[in-house]
């Protein structure tokens, strides 16, 4: 039983605590060969923002582990059932909080003005940072992103 619980903890740590990729430097395999619209823009403002973590598998994993741990409480099957229920609820809450905290990230919110005067806002990862006045290209897609304009205009 202890080996199963330990395995569940390791698996949940590997699966549930991976942050989504929000980098403007990375593309999914499905993006290869796709044509997307691109427009010139100038950064009007930039500010650091907190990007909330995910909340997908932590709750379920924590609930399952809590139920297993709680079911071993007490000597009767009635006590075990009550322990499993309480353990599942507590584990679910804890697992959700742990995953959300482990997957939160820092990013930047950019307001950009396109060549025709339209304003756009985009949030992306913090691995490439732009400042007000920087010339950028807005790449439409899923996800959309901004990159430095290599033309330097």
Image: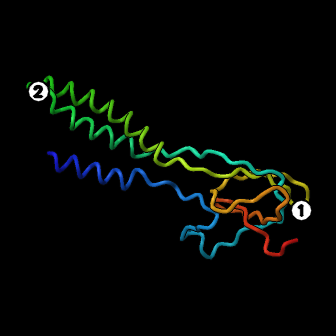
Locate residue 96 relative to residue 119 in the image: left or right: left
Q: How many marks?
A: 2
Spatial CA span between label 2 and label 1: 71 Å
Q: Which mark is residue 77?
A: 2
Residue in the image at 47% along x and 42% along y: 100
| Residue 50, percent from left and from top | 61, 45
Bin the neighbour count of mark 2 within 10 Å (Cα to Cα): few under 14, some 14-19, many 20 and up: few
- Point out the image quarter for the N terminus: top left
Locate residue 20 relative to residue 25 in the image: left or right: left
SS label for mark 2:
helix
Bin the neighbour count of mark 1 within 10 Å (Cα to Cα): few under 14, some 14-19, many 20 and up: few
Locate residue 82 relative to residue 143 in the image: left or right: left
| Residue 137, percent from left and from top | 78, 66
Residue 99, image quadrant:
top left
SS label for mark 1:
loop
- Residue where numbered disc 1 is placed: 115
Q: Which mark is residue 75?
A: none
Residue in the image at 80% along x and 50% along y: 45
Mark 2 touching mark 1, by CB under 8 A? no
Locate residue 19 relative to residue 145 in the image: left or right: left
Q: In this rendering, is residue 42 above or below 109? A: below
Residue in the image at 39% along x and 33% along y: 93
| Residue 123, percent from left and from top | 68, 52
Residue lying farthest to the right in this orientation: 116
Q: How is the rendered protein coloured? A: rainbow
Q: Earlier in the sequence, mark 2 or mark 1?
A: 2
Q: In this rendering, is residue 19 above or below 134? A: above
| Residue 54, percent from left and from top | 49, 46
- Point out the image quarter for the C terminus: bottom right
């Amino acid at each position: 039983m202890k080996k199963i619980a330990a395995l569940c903890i390791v698996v949940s740590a590997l699966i549930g605590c991976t942050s989504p990729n929000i980098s403007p430097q990375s593309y999914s395999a499905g993006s290869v060969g796709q044509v997307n619209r691109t427009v010139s823009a100038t950064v009007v403002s930039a500010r650091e923002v907190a990007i909330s973590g995910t909340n997908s598998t932590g709750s379920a994993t924590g609930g399952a582990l809590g139920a297993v741990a709680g079911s071993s409480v007490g000597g009767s099957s009635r006590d075990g059932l009550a322990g499993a229920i309480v353990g599942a609820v507590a584990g679910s809450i804890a697992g959700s909080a742990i995953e959300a905290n482990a997957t939160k990230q820092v990013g930047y919110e950019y307001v950009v003005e396109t060549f025709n005067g339209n304003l756009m806002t985009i949030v992306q990862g913090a691995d490439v940072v732009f400042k007000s006045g920087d010339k950028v290209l807005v790449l439409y897609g899923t996800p959309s992103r901004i990159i430095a304009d290599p033309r330097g205009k």
